[in-house]
Image: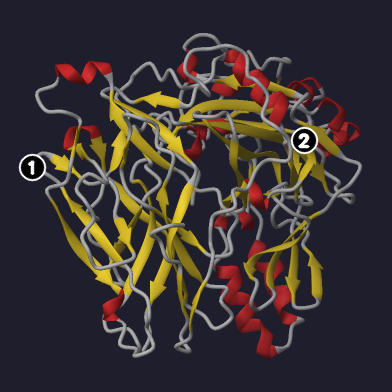
Amino acid sequence: MAGYTCFCWNRGGVYDLVSSEPEPFSLPSAIPEWPKGDGFAKGSIYLGELEVVNITKFQSIWSCYVSKNKREGATFYKPLTIPDGFFSLGDYGQQIGQPFQGFLLAARPAANSKEAELPPLQKPIDYTLIWCSANWQDDSHDGSVCFWFPCPPEGYRAVGYLVTDDSNKPSVDEVRCVRADLTDTCETHEPILCIESNSVDIPFTVWKSRPSFRGMWCKGVPVGTFCCSTNSNFNDEIEISCLKNFDPSLLAMPNLDQVHALIKHYGPTVFFHPKETYMPSSVSWFFTNGATLYTRGEEEGQAIDAKGSNLPGEGDNDGEYWIDLPDDESDDHVKYGNIDSAELYIHVKPALGGTFTDIAMWVFCPFNGPATLKVGLLNISLKHIGQHVGDWEHFTLRISNFTGELCSIYFSEHSGGEWVDISGLEFVEGNRAIIYSSKSGHASFPHPGTYLQGSEKLGIGVRNDAAWSKFYVDSSVHYMIIAAEYLGDVISEPCWLQYMREWGPTVEYNSRSELDKILSFLPVNLRYSVENVLDKLPVELFREEGPTGPKQKDNWVGDERT
């Protein structure tokens, strides 16, 4: 750590020097050698006029605690071991106490960049001081730090800030700015550090940055850098940019053989609750066991063949068609599913400008069961609320196209979801994570437990119970790739995927009367709190309406909701 000091501060005015070299978190098992292909997992990616590499080795520059228990704060790092010919684009920061999974991109001009009038990379012409520790009015302060913005030449953009442990400006050789047309807009994401106290003259906030547009065909590429401001309510356009991928071939994406290898190596095991009533099934099992297509204005329904080839494959969700369970009560078993037939339906797509691969895994259940309301220690089983025919749920694996390493998994939960880094996952075997599917509603969670859809603080909401059981589906074995648009016509999409209407009927009932009956039994001092929480839940929870299929979901072409 020669030349760098790790400095810690807390609100009590106590300062300590600490060692905070990053400890990288790794997967449980080694990454295999993937089948041969073009640019996937080759270590570098071409973005058109730029070639970029992923830097994961860092040297700590400065650390700061902002709580007395030293559990809150951040550390900032300088990239190390940058390959010859590549240049740093900025420094990296992350919160203290988190396993280290950071990355920074370093870049160099690609061979074809020589044809351009201006080079893709240029040194900054100067630096602007954004914030320094001299703004702390504390006599016991015995360390220093400065955050610098690289001033780009005309026609160029900075994509990261620099951090120094003294007040001297960094050398202009330390970082490169990027030609403006090779960049894209980015936005603030999660906060990394917020310094606001009586001993601080000027408040200071640091955020993660990410591309503003992150859908399947969006070109923005995250650099891994942060953005910062002395305005804690920062909402203006940020000064830095992200990179942009101008390579239409997306050569860093995996080919079909590599996709199969990724699924077999990383495919999670989905565990259903030990008291689950409504199990998953394959779509073909659902069709051949009596699922029926209904048309508006016609009393009789139509049987659906195993491939769904007689489903209407054009149009939008106009209410003209829907799928329902068999009318015959003797066929009521269909709603309980058939886990032996179940398989995960895979959509493979580029993410973050083709530097990552998203493997979205869809689970189908013939029926979504009614909800259970939790009010403190009281659990109330609801009769209708929350139930509907047909249930599509999903989770998404995000793979680095630099290395082929699993980076995180998105867990789709009711009315939202979250990305969980690999350090926060449970693994059942090797690098295969565990997905816990909640009882009746089938939302996905990274750990067992009871998750409330409502207010955790008040203990009021709809229960989502997740637990290990003997009921599971192994997605590394039981899967079907249903779409991978970037591969062209390599994958034939199933007929049923083109069905854009609802997979269950709309049934109107008075959910308010059921809730009012429940509320009438509650103490008066609880009623307002329960009503207030219930009013904020999605309206879909309070009526029986079948969902549309995967291709109608926002995340099919867009990014997961975060």
Q: Earlier in the sequence, mark 2 or mark 1?
A: 1
Is there any visible trace of residue 494 in the rendered image? no
Residue type for callout 2: Gly
* Residue in the image at 75% along x and 78% along y: 376
Label 2: how many residues lie within 10 Å, few (<14), some (14-19) or many (20+)? few
Residue furthest out toward the front? 2
Q: Position of residue 111 (x, y in %)?
A: 26, 17
Residue, disc 1: 154
Q: Is residue 370 above or below residue 520?
A: above
Q: Is residue 219 above or below residue 90?
A: above
Mark 2: secondary structure:
loop
* Residue in the foreground of this view, choosing between 70 and 377: 70
Residue type for callout 1: Glu
Q: Position of residue 416 (x, y in %)?
A: 55, 53
Q: Any mark on residue 430, and which?
A: 2
45 sits to left or right of 202: right
115 sits to left or right of 62: left
Q: Is residue 490 above or below residue 226?
A: above
Q: Are marks 2 and 1 in contact (CB under 8 Å)?
A: no
* Residue in the foreground of this view, choosing between 284 and 509: 284
